[in-house]
Amino acid sequence: MILEALNFVATLAISGRRRAAEINSSVRLWTRARRCARDWEPHEENCKAFLTSRMPAQGRVAVVLGSGLLRDVPIGELARNFDTVRLYDLQHLASVRLWALARGFRNLRFLQRDLSAGLDFLREDTEVDLVISANLLSQLGVAAERMGTDTADILQAHIDGLRAAPGRKLLLTDVAFDLVLKSGAIVERHDLMHGIALPEPAASWPWTVAPIGELDPAYKAVHRVVAIDIPA
Ligand SMILES: C[S@@+](CC[C@H](N)C(=O)[O-])C[C@H]1O[C@@H](n2cnc3c(N)ncnc32)[C@H](O)[C@@H]1O
């Protein structure tokens, strides 16, 4: 509780977007990620392995969309291989900035931006050699649904924005989730993509986002994640 409060206050003090609800949401993600670290590890390793296998050995600017806690991107390799790594999220926690600073990553740029407004800002940026959308897409959908806006339009705009962006484009996203009883029986299945079609995935795996007891004593939430090379 004390660590969360400190992280919240420090982030609020340094953030260019002083929005308590957004910072609170990032702090909750940080707490949950630490609590579920063992269950999330295979997913995070799969994400990093996919990105590493597609990453140019050298480049000018790499962009990470939904960079958040930097758990699912190979940040060391990105920092080594690229002149600059631009990290976009609504908020970047003070703890994450401090972690990066302590490791000497001097070419990371923490940029706050609402990515539900689209990716037009990338289109004309000729320095960008790599764009990674890092487990952000379904979150754009969840937020749009909450606000009553057209979810499918926002998701489709993100895919179209990636297609139009320069350089190599890689998409990681959860596309669906199941609520699974201890017996293994699936009690509910939800589509997170609201019917939009994605390009063919290069890889796919399950991600236990909430193990038994995290959301409910009776079931766990298992998401289906896809890794996609976005064609131009
Ligand atoms: C599932 S987390 C992925 C986190 C990250 N890739 C990591 O390794 O920790 C989704 C991230 O998307 C960010 N996000 C959600 N909605 C966003 C929006 N409209 N604009 C920018 N970032 C957003 C959240 O703040 C969160 O950091």
Image: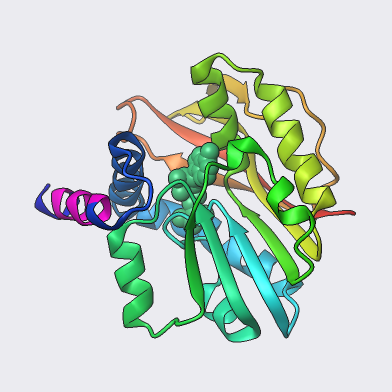
The C terminus - image quarter: bottom right
Q: What's drawn in magenta, residue-wise?
A: 5-12
Front one among 226 and 220 = 226
At horizontal 73% and vertical 67% (from top left) the residue drawn is 130
Q: Is residue 10 magenta?
A: yes
Q: Is residue 141 magenta?
A: no
Return the residue nearer the eye: 209 or 89. Answer: 89
Give percent across and percent down for residue 37: 36, 56
In the shown orientation, is residue 69 left or right of residue 197? left
Q: Nearer the viewer, residue 168 or 202?
A: 168
- Residue farthest left in this picture: 2
x and y, in percent, of residue 127 in the image: 74, 72
Q: Quadrant of the rendered structure where residue 74 is? A: bottom right
Q: Relative to 19, is 179 above or below?
A: above
The secondary structure that dominates the magenta segment is helix
Q: Residue at x 62, y 36 (%)?
A: 117
The residue drawn where x is 49% and y is 28% is 180
Q: Residue 110: image x %, image y %?
A: 46, 63
